[in-house]
Image (tube, grey):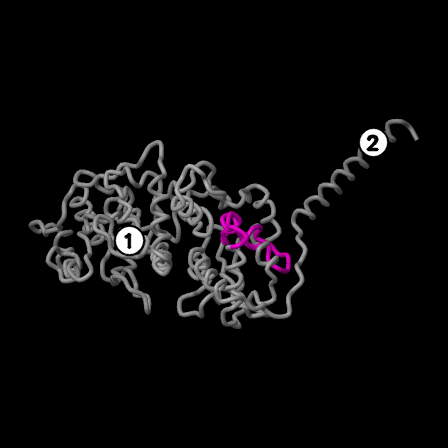
Amino acid sequence: MNSHLLKSRRLWIGVAALALIGATGAAMLMWRPAIAPIDHPPSFEAAQVQRGARVVEAGDCAVCHTRPGGQYLAGGLALVTPFGTLYSTNITPDPQTGIGSWSLPAFERAMREGIARDGHFLYPAFPYVHYRRMTAADIADAYAYLMSGPAVDSPAQQNHMNFPMNIRPLVSFWNLLFLHGEVLAPVAEHSEAWNRGRYLVEGPGHCAGCHSPLNLIGAEKSGENLAGGSVDGWEAPSLLGMARRANPWRQDQLVRYLRAEVVEGHGTAAGPMRPVSLGLAKLPISDAQAIAEYLLSLQTASTVKEVHSGATTVAPIDHNPGALLFASACAGCHAPSAPMRMIDGRPALTHTSALQSPSARNFLKTVLEGIPAIPGEPGPVMPPFAASLDNQQLTALASYLRQQATPGQPWTDLSSTIDALRQEAK
């Protein structure tokens, strides 16, 4: 055999070997072993179950794992992402359709690495990138609570993910890029409350999951933690520099807002934040106080300036179409002398964060969708106006109220934003 053929054969053998090594490495990266099932859920002391209830509430587990009208933690909620629609799963201790056959190591692996008991990859809509920062004790307590609840037979619904994200093993490459971070350690120079707030925000509360911008493959953008994002069509505002805005937050205001109360100067939580705040209201008030202390300590190099005019009332002006719409559709609850203003301390609309925001999206979403009543939960209720106000009327109302709240700072994208919201609702 001549030397040229020998060199050629060696080259192809080398290429084949490298390809085999690469394929083997990729296969190993995309594979995880199953963890043996347990026969039945263990029993736990009442104190641990009680601690676990607090952890599960702080982690907003029910917000995603309970669909409207469904059984608690039995899954089935549709989660619409840029990559398709996911359905949350059953995390009750049912052995066939829930996590009843999961051991604590299997549960902890899911919380820290996003791997199910049987070895399949969980999509990062499940915020394991944040849960991995939780302490082992908190994860064990959450496990105790979940495994002590009633088992519900509720099979998982079929996801509808777009190619290539419908190939679950590819999540392994996402993890390789973005699954970093360890258990949060206390920062010595800060108070115990500040450290507790940081832990709740960056760990179980996973606030950055909504309040940070995402890159093209759904990961939080590096260096922009808590700088503002979007979720379910709502604007999730930046949580940076909250104490130094033109309409700043005081700690007592933020604590009340976090606990689903109506706050003078800022309004009340709506949209996806509403169930989160109702959950926080069930926790000790010290947790909301800790979160507020931490958030109000965060700074940003260029704090967004919100214009606050100081106006306290909204009164109809001549025959302005927006003023007339306010008088007919809104004044019953929001006018200065409206009974609802007296009953629950509802603020003037000009003093709400939605009307003072640079974007009209949250105000328009609230008008279109309202604030629905949640059975058994306190809080304001507002009817939806999507069917009763057309686009021209919405534009007139929003323009009028924005002028009252921030004179000389009109929203310039009302028409396109309304069109987008109508389209999203179809």
Main SS of the magenta segment? loop
Residue at x 35% of width, y 31% of height: 301
Quadrant position of the N terminus in the picture: top right
Q: Which residue is label 2 attached to?
A: 8
Residue to which mark 1 is pinned: 256
Please report the bounds of the magenta region as a residue range.
Answer: 110-137
Residue 19: x %, y % from top left: 74, 40
Q: Disc 2 and disc 1: Cα gap in Å? A: 74 Å
Q: Residue at x 35, y 36 (%)?
A: 299
Mark 1 belongs to which amino acid?
Answer: Arg
Q: Nearer the viewer, residue 423 or 377?
A: 377
Image height of 72 relative to 187, above or below: below
Name the residue located 29 percent from the left edge and 44 percent from the top edge: 359
- The answer to whether residue 210 is left or right of residue 43 is left
Location of residue 380 in the rendering, given as x and y in whole percent from the top left corner:
25, 61
* Mark 2 touches mark 1? (CB < 8 Å): no
Kind of residue at disc 2: Ser
In which quadrant is the C terminus drawn? bottom left
Looking at this view, is 336 or 391 the one in front? 336
Let me know if residue 50 appears in the view: yes
